[in-house]
């Protein structure tokens, strides 16, 4: 279940459990810090376990443009030839996408580098403030101009008379990346310089990470209390030779939450107790919600509470700003409300994450309250509702990954899933590996072969849900007829299909509140259904609607493309057919039993035409797929056909 960057959406099936092992991708924050300091060092550094993602690609591109030699090494490693504090290229234009870590740290480093540089990013990057960092750097003598709006990127840096030394003040309450960037840049000045944080220092663990990485490269920053940091005279980066990037603790949060929600155990490998990343403390927050957590040196395991259900918490999430987003969607399944406090930094990330999170949680049925720096989530009382238009992700990788957890309550459509490439390109494939989707038995075949009859009985035998997908095409044909839309008007039909107001109960189908079980079975509507079903836009409009029927404990469904298109991951796929004469006879009898007049020949003729049309159409044609078991019911009773399906299903599980 990989995604491409341009993919409009991904539909996640409802998930019933989760368990397994995930080897984490490298930490984004560490990857970019290690790349930068390796580049600035004297000597060569081999970095292994580097994250391959958009954000690290932006840093690699920038360093290469600045004249740093970087060669790939093995699957996820690089060898960096350090430049000893002076980039060979003195004039360059750098594009940094939406990579905040790269943008802030390079701004600081280049401001002290003595060249002509411009730094720009995607439009959202130009809405993320950087004024406090620029102010701090200007106080050191750097020449930095705003090329767009005051206090925001893009920036132009010119050689200035840099006067490091003394004490620089920097605000700590907008982004800790300002302080991190400044600290990483100061050893280039060569003299003792102190940095004093004004305002609260948010996301402190990221600063600790910066200090730990600097120490690894030979620069020991002296702390004086919690707010003053001194970079000693004569500091210079020296390569440690080899460094390994830890697994990404923020990325771990999704899988730990999966373990806590889906039974578990889910074990994430690559981070643990000895991690320098603040987001490992996400595991503590999950434990507060009741999850059973084991933290080893380099792995963390999460399981659901013994009671089965998590409970809401009230948390100051300042230390884990990124991973805390995962708590917001985990809270959908907890008992009671969850409040996340002290998260003002969410507003200046890839998007305004407080607003985005609130809007999308509401779409799922949660009640959400939000303030300038807090968010409160009351889980939906009647179970999750999945919006047919999908969950929006705001070009924010974490929104996409967080909302995958909603699949515990219902199938969920995630729009623009390719945005995960920022930090975790194969996230959805890994998600599929550790989650068990609600099982599906997909029965496809031609008209009157007995699919519906057999599928409904199999569903009853297993206690599963049943979807007669043909009924949705029939309902579309009927609704169109009633609205005066012809069956050849693809776009108008697609609108009708998308807005169908239908309800299925145990033995009736309702359209806009009216019982239509008999009306949709008439021969006229049968012919209309076959016509409307040939339009790609109609099929697209009905796709997610069909997938929404996949609810625990399982789904039995019949149609033409259940196994090939709608539920390609169905555990059991059956192609159910019968000779056309047998099918005509069955349809004839069915119509007679329902009190309709009928004769065999026209039915036979009609079946042949429909077989032809359903199997020749370019989209989702009726065809036996390779994985489907062939079941010819010509000489079987209904009971025998049902038994056969149940037996195949028994073999599949
Ligand atoms: N062996 C059999 N398997 C399935 N249906 C059968 C069988 N023999 C007779 N029938 C009858 O065939 C008719 C058509 O079945 P239906 O489920 O409506 O087909 P479909 O959904 O494939 O169009 C029903 O009246 C059903 O009772
Ligand atoms: N998954 C599906 C289900 C039905 N269709 C089409 C094929 C048929 O012409 C109509 C009606 O389907 P239905 O299964 O109710 O029809 P029959 O009972 O087989 O005659 O819809 C489809 O294209 N794809």
Image (spheres, rainbow, N blue to C red):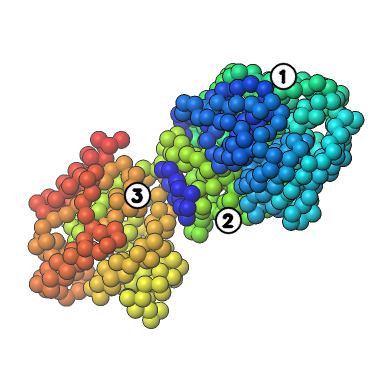
Q: Where is residue 73 in the image (x, y as percent from the top left)?
A: 49, 26
Quadrant in the rendering for residue 207: top right
C-alpha separation, residue under disc 1 versus residue under disc 2: 50 Å
> Helix or strand or loop: what does disc 2 sit on?
helix
Some atom of ligand 2 lies within 8 Å of the CB belonging to the residue at label 1: no
Q: Which of 357 and 181 is in front in this view?
A: 181
**Marking on residue 192:** none
> Helix or strand or loop: what does disc 3 sit on?
loop
C-alpha separation, residue under disc 3 versus residue under disc 1: 55 Å
- The residue depicted at 16 percent of the width and 75 percent of the height is 597
The residue singled out by tag 3 in the image is 567
Viewer-side label of 1, 2: 1
The residue singled out by tag 1 in the image is 218
Of the numbered discs 2 and 3, the one sitting upstream in the chain is 2
Q: In this view, does 621 lie above or below 572?
A: below
Left or right relative to 397: residue 574: left
- The residue depicted at 57 percent of the width and 35 percent of the height is 251
Q: Which of 285 and 397 is in front in this view?
A: 397
Q: Is residue 272 above or below residue 349?
A: above
Of the numbered discs 3 and 1, the one sitting upstream in the chain is 1
**Marking on residue 363:** 2
C-alpha separation, residue under disc 2 versus residue under disc 3: 24 Å
Quarter of the rendering occupied by the N terminus: top left
**Residue 273 in sight here:** no
Q: Where is residue 359 in the image (x, y as percent from the top left)?
A: 63, 55
Q: In this view, does 233 lie above or below 137?
A: above
Some atom of ligand 2 lies within 8 Å of the CB belonging to the residue at label 2: no
């Amino acid at each position: 279940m990989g995604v491409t960057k341009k993919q409009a959406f991904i539909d996640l099936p409802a998930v019933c459990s989760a368990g397994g092992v995930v080897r984490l991708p490298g930490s984004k924050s560490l990857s970019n810090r290690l790349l930068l300091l390796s580049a600035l060092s004297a000597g060569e550094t081999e970095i292994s376990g580097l994250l391959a993602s958009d954000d690290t690609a932006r840093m690699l591109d920038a360093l290469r443009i600045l004249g740093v030699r970087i060669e790939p090494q093995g699957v996820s490693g690089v060898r960096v030839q350090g430049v000893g504090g002076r980039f060979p290229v003195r004039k360059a234009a750098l594009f940094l996408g939406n990579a905040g870590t790269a943008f802030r740290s390079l701004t600081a480093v280049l401001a002290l580098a003595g060249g002509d540089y411009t730094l720009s990013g995607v439009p959202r990057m130009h809405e993320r403030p950087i004024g406090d960092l620029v102010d701090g750097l200007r106080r050191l003598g750097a020449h930095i101009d705003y090329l767009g709006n005051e206090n925001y990127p893009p920036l132009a840096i010119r050689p200035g008379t840099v006067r490091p030394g003394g004490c620089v003040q920097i605000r700590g309450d907008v982004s800790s990346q300002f302080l991190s960037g400044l600290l990483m840049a100061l050893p280039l000045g060569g003299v003792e310089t102190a940095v004093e944080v004004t305002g609260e220092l948010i996301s402190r663990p990221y600063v600790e990470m910066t200090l730990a990485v600097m120490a690894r490269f030979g620069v020991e920053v002296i702390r004086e209390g919690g707010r003053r940091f001194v970079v000693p005279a004569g500091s210079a980066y020296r390569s440690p030779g080899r460094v390994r990037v830890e697994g990404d603790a923020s990325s771990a949060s999704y899988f730990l939450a999966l373990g806590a929600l889906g039974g578990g155990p889910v074990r994430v490998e690559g981070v643990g107790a000895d991690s320098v990343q603040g987001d490992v403390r996400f595991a503590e927050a999950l434990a507060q919600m009741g999850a059973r957590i084991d933290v080893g040196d380099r792995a963390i395991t999460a399981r659901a509470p013994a009671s089965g259900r998590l409970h809401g918490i009230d948390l100051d999430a300042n230390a884990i700003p990124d991973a805390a987003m995962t708590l917001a969607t985990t809270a959908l399944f907890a008992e009671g409300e969850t409040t996340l406090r002290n998260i003002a930094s969410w507003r200046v990330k890839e998007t305004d994450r407080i607003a985005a999170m609130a809007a999308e949680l509401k779409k799922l049925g949660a009640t959400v309250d939000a303030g300038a720096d807090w968010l409160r989530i009351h889980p939906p009382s009647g179970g999750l509702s999945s919006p047919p238009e999908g969950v929006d992700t705001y070009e924010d990788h974490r929104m996409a990954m967080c909302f995958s957890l909603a699949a515990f309550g219902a199938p969920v459509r995630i729009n623009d899933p390719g945005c995960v490439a920022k930090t975790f390109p194969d996230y959805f494939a890994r998600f599929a590996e550790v989650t068990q989707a609600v099982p599906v038995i997909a029965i496809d075949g031609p008209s009157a072969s007995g699919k519906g009859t057999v599928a409904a009985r199999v569903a009853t035998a297993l206690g599963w849900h049943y979807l007669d997908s043909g009924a949705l095409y029939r309902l579309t044909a009927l609704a169109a007829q009633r609205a005066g839309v012809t069956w050849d008007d693809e776009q108008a039909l697609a609108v009708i299909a998308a807005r169908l107001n239908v309800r299925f109960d145990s033995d009736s189908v309702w359209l806009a509140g009216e019982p239509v079980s008999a009306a949709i079975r008439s021969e006229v509507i049968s012919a209309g259904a076959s016509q409307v079903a040939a339009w790609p836009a109609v099929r697209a409009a009905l796709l997610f609607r069909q997938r929404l029927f996949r609810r625990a404990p399982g789904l039995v469904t019949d149609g033409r493309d259940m196994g090939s298109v709608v539920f390609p991951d169905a555990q059991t796929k059956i192609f159910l057919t019968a000779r056309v004469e047998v099918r005509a006879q069955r349809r004839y009898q069915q119509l007679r039993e329902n009190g309709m007049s009928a004769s065999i020949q026209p039915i036979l003729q009609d079946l042949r035409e429909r077989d032809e049309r359903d199997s020749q159409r370019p989209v989702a044609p009726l065809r036996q797929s390779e994985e489907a078991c062939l079941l010819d019911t010509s000489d079987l009773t209904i009971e025998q056909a049902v038994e056969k399906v149940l037996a195949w299903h028994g073999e599949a599980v």
